[in-house]
Amino acid sequence: MRTGLTEATIQKMHDYEASDLPEREKTALALADRLAFDHRGLDAALVARLRTAFTEEELVDLGMSIAFLLGWGRFIEAFGILPEGWQEGATPWNPVSGGPPTGQS
């Protein structure tokens, strides 16, 4: 797994299919999009791409990770949970407390 996500890579993710990201990353992003926005619309073409790009174990790990993060986001939003030291309207890029969340630099 690659670390050090750059702003340039993040920008490519907005239109990942047309980007020069590796096919494996495009496929993972396609799965994330499908699970987030149309989970019942998982079609044979995407399944074939996934099975080409990932082993069964990797696909289960990827799917579980995506599902957890989507569910976690919904849970914390539903219950109005904010990280310690944050206030309503703060974002990870503009924390009200004046610094990055604990553990980030």
Image (cartoon, rainbow, N blue to C red):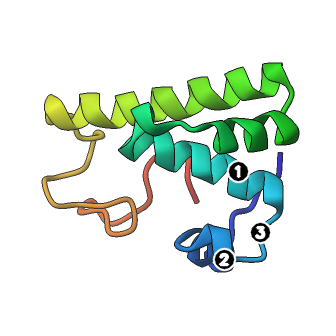
Pointer 2 or 1: first along the chain: 2
Q: Position of residue 75 (x, y in %)?
A: 26, 28
Is 104 in front, or is 78? Answer: 78
Pointer 1 or 3: first along the chain: 3
In this view, the mark in front (2 or 3): 2
Using the image, tell me which numbered label, if any, was put on residue 21: 3
**What residue type is disc 2 on?**
Ala
Q: CA distance from mark 1 to mark 3?
A: 10 Å
Q: Among all residues in the image, which is located at the extreme front?
A: 44
Using the image, tell me which numbered label, if any, was put on residue 27: 1
The picture quadrant where one finds residue 3 is bottom right
The residue identified by callout 2 is 18
Around disc 3, counting alpha carbons within 10 Å, would you say few (fewer than 14), some (14 to 19), or many (20 or more)?
A: some
Q: Position of residue 7 (x, y in %)?
A: 61, 77
Around disc 2, counting alpha carbons within 10 Å, would you say few (fewer than 14), some (14 to 19), or many (20 or more)?
A: few
At x 16%, y 32%, the residue is 78
At x 63%, y 69%, the residue is 16
At x 81%, y 21%, the residue is 56
Using the image, tell me which numbered label, if any, was put on residue 16: none
Q: Quadrant of the C terminus?
A: bottom right
**What residue type is disc 3 on?**
Leu
Q: CA distance from mark 2 to mark 1?
A: 12 Å
In this view, the mark in front (1 or 3): 1
**Compared with residue 22, is residue 62 higher up or lower down, i.e. above or below?**
above
